[in-house]
Every structure is written in structure tokens, then in C-alpha cells.
Image (cartoon, rainbow, N blue to C red):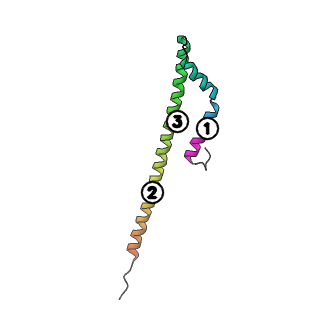
Amino acid sequence: MAADDHPFDALEHRFEMEDTSASAISRMVLNLASHLPMPWLLSSAISEIKDHLAADGLDRIRLVLETCKSEVRESFRLSEGISAGKRRRRQITLTVRIPLPC
């Protein structure tokens, strides 16, 4: 991930790169083969491949959730820092005010 990439953009780019490495034709063939009657050994192999693809989908979901969590935590940390700075400035302003004689 480049330093100037937003985490969501970097994640989307990663998924696009993974999708280009997986052939659409091989996915179609796998889908078709899973619906055809086959000997046990071939159907077992096809089932394993489909399970692997499903696990990849779950990994993607996990990555998106982890990215969301880290972004929310970072935003919360920044907002807390801003709030603390405002409180400090308010306290300084209150202590510096000197009443003028009337």
C-alpha cells in the first residue's frame, strides 16, 4: 500500500488485483463441474476448491471489517484529541481573563 493511499482504496485495489489473477473461465468451469454428476474423487476435489474459494471470500470480509475497525478507532482517537484541545483552550481562556475596573 502506498503511503498516500486511503486504507479503503488500497483494500479495493488489492481485491481487484486478486480478481485479475483468478480466471473467470476457471470459475465458470468450476461452477459447471460442481453441478454435473462426477465420480467421488473428482467431486471431492471440486468441493475442496469451492471451499477454498469460499474461505477467500471470508478472508475478504474479515479484512474489510478490520480496516473499518482501525479507521473508526483512528477517527475516535483524533476526535478525542480535538475535544481535549478545545477543553484546554477553554480552561486557559477562563483563567486568563482579568476583570476590568468599572
- Amino acid bearing label 2: Ser
The CA distance from mark 1 to mark 2 is: 32 Å
Q: Secondary structure at mark 3?
A: helix
Front position among marks 1 and 2: 1
Quarter holding residue 53: top right
The boundaries of the magenta stretch are: 1-18
* Residue placed under numbered mark 3 in the picture: 60
Give the class, few, some or many, for how many residues have Cα within 10 Å of label 2's Cα (few <14, many ≥20). Answer: few
Which is more N-terminal, label 2 or label 3?
Answer: 3
At 58% from the left edge and 37% from the top edge, which residue is drawn? 15
Q: Which mark is residue 90?
A: none
- Image height check: is 10 above or below 58? below
* Left or right of residue 39: residue 99: left
* Residue placed under numbered mark 2 in the picture: 79
* Residue placed under numbered mark 1 in the picture: 16
Front position among marks 3 and 2: 3
Q: Secondary structure at mark 1?
A: helix
